Image (cartoon, rainbow, N blue to C red):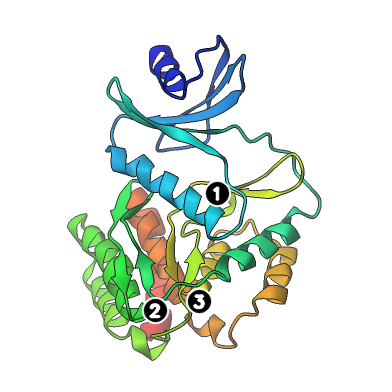
Amino acid sequence: MENVIRKAIESMGDKDRILNIKKLSGGDINEAFYVETEKKPYFLKFNRNVTAEFFQSEKDGLLELQTKGGVNVPEVYGLFEGMGYNGLILEWIEERPQTNIQSLLGEAVARLHGVAAERFGFRSDTFIGEMKQENGWWENWVDYYRERRLAPQLEQAAAKGLLRDKRRNGAEYIAANLEKWIPAQPVPALLHGDLWSGNWMSRFNGEPVFIDPSVFYGHNEMEIAFTELFGGFSTEFYEAYSCSKPLDSEYDTRKELYQLFYLLVHLNSFGEIYGRHVDRVIQKYTG
């Protein structure tokens, strides 16, 4: 792996001596490393099982968050392809927890969601985990959510034998009747797309930094619903967010419909352990 790392660093024009290489834990998709040269520290991630499009998508998402959303992301130094690997070279973020970081995070997410597009989706395909997601631009939010988010996950779950008859019937009913609960034309807001507690950091100066996006333009409630699914976001986060971008009074009636997508992603990624969570949502909306 050292030769791959050296080639990646050299591809950035940094030919200084490497002082330290440290393999990092925590991710279940990529191999990640802290690399320090005489010039600067880097964060590198590699994967031999994905195409170059995988990391190109992450790079595009980070730049969209930074340039359009005005939020902090690691500086993107470049992509790497060679020696059987694809990779991404990023700024090393020196993390330091701050007491008011959740409020700052809520403000940053609200700022992100204040960026609007004319249509729903994104100009290129993206990934959630290693799952490719087709995007394109759509006029109707319900159609986009059904066809580009729910349907592919349901198809994958069926192919894996994870949709029993009752689960399949309920999920298909919900997908076919989304208009009963979800508005067709909310404002298309810029979303991180995979905003759980592990996909942001606190920079040493106290600013939140967003990582590992799956960017698209959609209903802001979908993002907030995901933050509520697995925890990690405090009361201060939601208060700060709501001060800038109050949630609709009907949010609680459709929150779990948005969580259903992420539960299906986890069902397809990790198996039946998430089945009962999917069933609970289906039961709520089908009686």
Residue visible at 26% across and 71% down? Answer: 147
User: Does 112 appear above or below 272?
Assistant: below
Front residue of 287 and 209: 209
Mark 2 neighbour density, 10 Å: few (under 14) some (14–19) many (20 or more): some
Distance from disc 3 to disc 2, alpha carbons, whole Å, reads 14 Å
Mark found first going from the N terminus, 3 or 2: 3
Tell me the kind of residue under disc 2.
Gln
User: Does 218 appear above or below 155?
Assistant: below
Secondary structure beneath dot 3 equals: helix
- Residue 268 is situated, as x and y percent measured from the top left of the image, at 32, 54
Look at the image and tell me whether residue 151 can be seen: yes
Toward the left, the furthest residue is 159
Position of residue 105 in the picture relative to residue 69 (left or right): right
Secondary structure beneath dot 2 equals: helix
Q: Quadrant of residue 275?
A: bottom left
- Residue 49 is situated, as x and y percent measured from the top left of the image, at 28, 34
Q: Identify the image quadrant of the C terminus.
A: bottom left
Distance from disc 1 to disc 3, alpha carbons, whole Å, reads 21 Å
Say which mark, if any, is on residue 255: 3
Tell me the kind of residue under disc 3.
Lys
Are dots 3 and 2 in contact, CB under 8 Å? Answer: no
Secondary structure beneath dot 1 equals: helix
